[in-house]
Amino acid sequence: MKLVNTLQKLKDGVDLKIVALGDSLTFGWMTEYGYIDYLKTMIKQEYPASIFSIFNKGIPGDTARDGLRRVENDVIRLSPDLVLIQFALNDAYTGFSPEDFQSNLESIILKIKDRDSTEIALLTSVALLNHAENKFAQEYYKKISESGLKYNIPVVKVHEYWETKINSGIKHTLLVQLDGIHPTESGYKFMAEAVFDLFR
């Protein structure tokens, strides 16, 4: 699944508006450079003639239900060409079932899809060091993949990209802050690399 309109606008140098809706991983918690900062640089290097803006609508602590509450004001009002949606871990840790999470995520998707020209991409969150917690998180990531297939929307599996890096010998502890969840700048760079695959 390709972001056909987005890629064409980047190639043609037509003004492009991207909104990133999510939680603290979208916000860029406790770092100077989050994934969106790295992504901007990557896009500009790949498409030097492009004219684009990315609006960071990540709020630490938010769940997909919070995103649904905010989607009208934070996303639709801006009339974006592309929306990047990233939620899951706060939903998991605050008691939302995977099914509840999926329901809220799909409600966000449907509200945005009411605007025919807007493209959407879904993002999973990071891989966790603790095996049990990582397995639990992947129940929610699975729902993201299911929703992507249901609505023909590309899904960026950030956690799998991280796992590939970790399996290649990069220590998980170098990718996360002391809480073991929020990325360091190195972790955010890998997150951006995963997302940038959408723009190739």
Image (cartoon, rainbow, N blue to C red):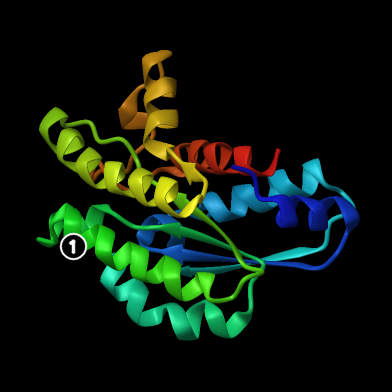
Report the side of 173 relative to 108 (left or right). left
Q: Nearer the viewer, residue 48 or 173?
A: 48
Q: Quadrant of the C terminus?
A: top right
Q: Which residue is mark 1?
A: 100
Q: Nearer the viewer, residue 161 or 24?
A: 161
How many marks overall? 1
**x 57%, y 85%: residue:** 77
Rendered location of residue 96, percent (x, y): 14, 61
Mark 1: few/some/many CA within 10 Å (<14, 14-19, 20+): some
Q: Quadrant of the N terminus?
A: top right
Residue that lies at the very extreme toward the top in this rendered image: 168
Quarter location, residue 18: bottom right
Q: Nearer the viewer, residue 90 or 85?
A: 85
Report the side of 169 relative to 52 (left or right). left
Q: Is residue 173 above or below residue 48?
A: above
Asked if residue 33 shows in the view, the reply is no
Report the side of 58 relative to 105 (left or right). right
**x 50%, y 50%: residue:** 152
- Dot 1: what SS? helix
User: Which residue type carries mark 1?
Assistant: Asp
**x 35%, y 41%: residue:** 126
Q: Nearer the viewer, residue 89 or 36?
A: 89
Asked if residue 20 shows in the view, the reply is yes
Q: Is residue 53 above or below residue 185?
A: below
Quarter location, residue 29: bottom left
**x 45%, y 75%: residue:** 111
Rendered location of residue 66, percent (x, y): 30, 74
Rendered location of residue 67, percent (x, y): 36, 72
